[in-house]
Image (cartoon, coloured by chain):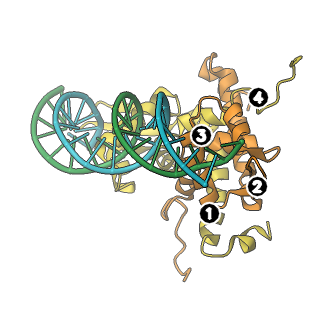
Chain colours: A yellow, B orange, C cyan, D green
Amino acid sequence: METNAETAAERKCPIETVIQLLGGKWKPLILWHLLDAAKRFSELEKLIPEVTQKMLAQHLRELEADKLVTRTIYPSVPPKVEYALSDYGKTMVPVLETMCAWGENHNRLSSRPIAQAIAPV
Amino acid sequence: METNAETAAERKCPIETVIQLLGGKWKPLILWHLLDAAKRFSELEKLIPEVTQKMLAQHLRELEADKLVTRTIYPSVPPKVEYALSDYGKTMVPVLETMCAWGENHNRLSSRPIAQAIAPV
DNA sequence: CTGTATCCAAATGGATACTG
DNA sequence: CAGTATCCATTTGGATACAG
């Protein structure tokens, strides 16, 4: 019987939380493109050519609901909408960067034997 | 061939690589449970009660194919199979920990106003 | 330009039964 | 114990058309 002091493995893994927030196929990529500056809907479409309008809109709405991105509507003609990382979304930057660093290393070494890949870390 | 200095955002985002490797619904959780020690199939089943045999086996095979976990068969009766983080899989630990730290903070603050949540980082 | 709606295809996940 | 196989439900993603 447990007295108190749950281990991290015993309570609900917080990694699941991150996976849920970044779970969509394009969400990390969207956030990645918002790192440097706010972007319009059509700009994101050009930056991520493989994504469909539907999925881009859907993921943006989810990211907005999760308070990770902000949506600013400029009441002009034609309509202009800008998406940006919220202050809260910016706290995710270290996560994105850590993932990015690992992914870069993986991609760079993926054509080599794994035994070599892990050696000099 | 590194004549042109592409920015990170211009080449294929390495974050996608990580998402692909951790993409399955249970993969991060499996890795999380392998952090401290190797586990048997049935142990993982008990640690992750919500996962089905099928998905556990499937994700373990994918993680094995990606060289993130090792599979050791002990030719005993009854059969015993142990799964463990590979050396390469261990390089993923900082990624898991960064995600975990963000997730913990998010979970802890999710019932508070976001404005409060981001303040003292 | 910035979306929504609809229909459809593919991927993912789950329940159950069966095997070495 | 440690799986595989099969069938089915749910989820996700995409193509196209349409609207404010």
* Nearer to the camera, B94 or A56: B94
- Report in which chain the residue with disc 2 lies: B
User: Quick check: D17 above or below A7?
Assistant: below
Query: Marks 3 and 1: same chain?
Result: no
* Quadrant where the image shows the N terminus of chain A: top right
Q: Residue at x 86, y 19 (%)?
A: A2
Chain ID at mark 4 = A
Which type of secondary structure does the marked residue at label 1 adopt?
A: helix
Q: CA distance from mark 3 to mark 4?
A: 15 Å
Q: Which amino acid type corresponds to the residue marked 4 in the rendered image?
A: Glu
Look at label 3 and name its amino acid. Answer: Trp
Count of numbered labels shown in the rendering: 4
Q: Chain of mark 3?
A: B
Instruction: Identify the mark at residue A10; answer none if there is no mark.
Output: 4
The foreground one among A117 and B24 is B24
Crowding near the residue tagged with mark 1, few <14, some 14–19, many ≥20 C-alpha atoms within 10 Å = some
Q: Which residue is mark 1?
A: A104
Instruction: For mark 3, give the secondary structure.
Output: loop
Say what secondary structure mark 4 lies in: loop
The residue where tag 2 is placed is: B90
Q: Position of residue B28 (x, y in %)?
A: 64, 43
Judged left or right of residue A95, residue C11 is left
| Residue C4 percent coordinates (x, y) | 25, 28
Along the line of sight, which residue is nearer the eye, A41 or A57?
A: A57
Residue lying at the far right of the rendered structure: A3
Residue at the image position 31 percent from the left and 38 percent from the top = A80
Nearer the observer: mark 3 or 1; the answer is: 3
Amino acid type indicated by mark 2: Lys
Neighbour tally class for label 4: few under 14, some 14-19, many 20 plus, Cα within 10 Å: few
Quickly name the residue at label 3.
Answer: B26
The residue at the point 29 percent across, 30 percent down is A75
For the residues marked 4 and 2, what is the alpha-carbon distance in whole angstroms? Answer: 20 Å
